[in-house]
Image (tube, rainbow, N blue to C red):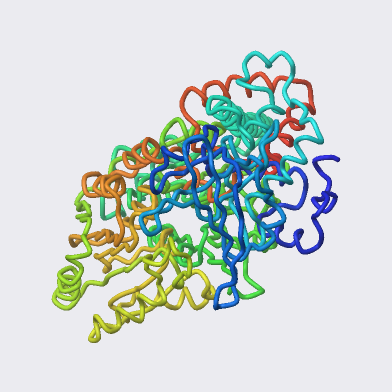
Amino acid sequence: MRLNHSVANLPGVGPAYQKRLQKLNINTISDLINHFPSRYLDYSHTTPINKLEPDQEVCLKATLVSLTSVRLPNRKTLQKATVTDSTGSLQLTWFNQPYLTNSLIPKQQYYFTGQVDQFRNQLILNSPDFEPIKKKQLHTNRIIPLYPLTAGISHKWLRHKISLVLSSLTIKEIFPSSLKSRLPIDLNSAYHQVHFPDTQKQLESAQKRLSLNDLIGIYLKSALTQLDWQQRSATPITTTPSLHNQLLKKLDFDLTPDQQQAINDVFTDLKQTIPMNRLLQGDVGSGKTIVAVSAALQVVKQGFQTLVLAPTQVLAEQHYQSFSQLLKPFSIKPLLVTGQSKKKLPTAPLVIGTHALLHRPELIQNQKLGLVVIDEQHRFGVLQRSSFFNSVSTPHLLTMSATPIPRTIALSLYGHLTISNINTLPKNRKPIKTKVVSEIKRPQAYQWIKQQITTRKTQAFFICPLIEDSSSESLKTVKAATSEYQRLQQVFPDLKIALLHGKMKPEQKNTILKEFKSKKYDILVSTPVIEVGIDIPNANIMVIEGAQRFGLSQLHQLRGRVGRGEHQSFCLLFSSEISTTSLHRLKLMEKYQRGLTLAKLDLQLRGAGEIFGTAQSGHLDTQFPQFWNADLNKQAKQIAQQLVLLPKPQPQQLLVSLNPNLAKTTSPN
């Protein structure tokens, strides 16, 4: 058995189980052992029957006294068992499992695990798992792994298959033996202990080792990318201070010190023969666009082409309008390219577009391409294969992101980039008043919203976590956009309401957003699809339903969709079910306006997983970001720096072993 073999090679995995496993992205043996537990139950200690309490998760070591199967009126069956230990007896029940009469043998000892229930003042164990007592338990009397599942796949079945694989092969250590002393546990042991931990301490060592693998992969990728980038050559572009001053005079606002510093950084980079690879981080509404416009003006006036890439058509159109307006005095007219653009378009010195631009090579002047600006680059998976970074002369690259990332995380994600930060907001930008609203005050809030819309002629967003109502028990109280859209039409019969969600066709979404921007609608009910790049100055109210389901960084991104105009803006956070911890977290939104501050708090409260989820949107395919910390970051960086010095192609081969998705490219993004 090998890691790259299909799971079909495992006994008991036929076509039906293969299809089910595919839904969990499990196709190979490697996929199976990398399907890690989402949580654990500690059944490593047994509890005497006389010490049981309601709602307790327990493991019993008891002898089966009797087992009967009773047919119920609805053609279902009920299995009842009595078990004893030295302290007392207990009743166990199962539904529709008549085979148990053959599986469980009276007078034999078993381990039983499950939650203690109370029925008619009597304690029972309902539908417990069980195993005969043997040397090595798999499902009982140990720390039990619980996995992400799909229909037709049980925890027990998955445990059995993973155990079979781990007992049949040894996972080879991927790092040189010289690094052995720096690793918390060897790789083979890490896989065994993360799936079937012997102790809590060994589980933590395994998780730390696999977290370290994640981080080393990212730092190694970063180091290899940096090496590759430094070996490239770019055409140095002379910047003209007088030209920049002309642009500044045309502006109806003054640059903040951070904006001017970022422009200086970019101008310095443009003059170099090694291509610029700079990340411009700025909070929502901080004014990153003017930095890109300043750079584009210099590049175009030197006779080179600039490309500006945006993740959505709406954002591409907004950039097109901004660049057109600011560069009109300099006789520079951008070309807009989207999926709906004509087949035949003229080439232009400044081209702005969505990912559709990457499929229009005739519009890209490779020999004269001087600058590429990418907005929210993590949303461009196809960019990794784009041709303009593989030409003889590499263009300068400026990446912009409104996703705030704490420094320790940014260093691991973007260690190969130089970073400019815009921390100060433009003058006269009013802080968005944010309020956590209790369910009891919902009618009062609705009345206030209606008053604001009718008297101030403002507009409102209503954001829902789901598109449609869910049958899942845990999501039953979570608002869905489609049903909320219908409900709000009854709440606000005199207002015009539109619906927007991710399942709509791009043309439909763009039409709705344009109509909302032109004030055709008073309220837009939407999923978080509006998170990136929507600039509607007249929208001053943001209502977020199920706010506890979002991280602080994502809430901040959503909040940033309002507050673009001159009037006071508001953000209302609703949550029907909220714990004390969640309420404390949401209250931080009332207190803090800066995205970076909230991202740091998110890192403390929820771990790095939230930051990476927002920042990379699945791009890194990492397994244990929640365990990342500054010490682990430092250790991973030091190890990666050693690995990158190994003779070729060893570093690249190691990256393939650590993270195949990262290894597919060493492109600048």
Q: From the viewer's perspective, is 384 left or right of 242?
A: right
Residue 134: quadrant of the picture: top right
Identify the residue at horizontal 70%, vertical 20% (top origin).
645
The x and y percentages for residue 234 are 63, 38
Instruction: Give percent across and percent down for residue 416.
Output: 57, 32
Q: Is residue 195 left or right of residue 333?
A: right
> Is residue 324 among what the camera can see?
no
Percent coordinates x, y for residue 362 in the rendering:
69, 62
Residue at horizontal 57 percent and vertical 67 percent from the top:
337
> Left or right of 506: which side holds 231?
right
In the rendered view, would you say 270 is above or below 249?
above
User: Where's residue 623, x and y in %?
Assistant: 59, 40
Q: Is residue 420 above or below residue 293?
A: above
Indicate the quadrant containing the N terminus: top left, top right, bottom left or bottom right: top right
Nearer to the camera, 240 or 186 = 186
The C terminus, quarter of image: top right
For image coordinates 70% across by 51% down, the residue present is 385
Closer to the camera in the image, 581 or 287: 581
Q: How many marks?
A: 0
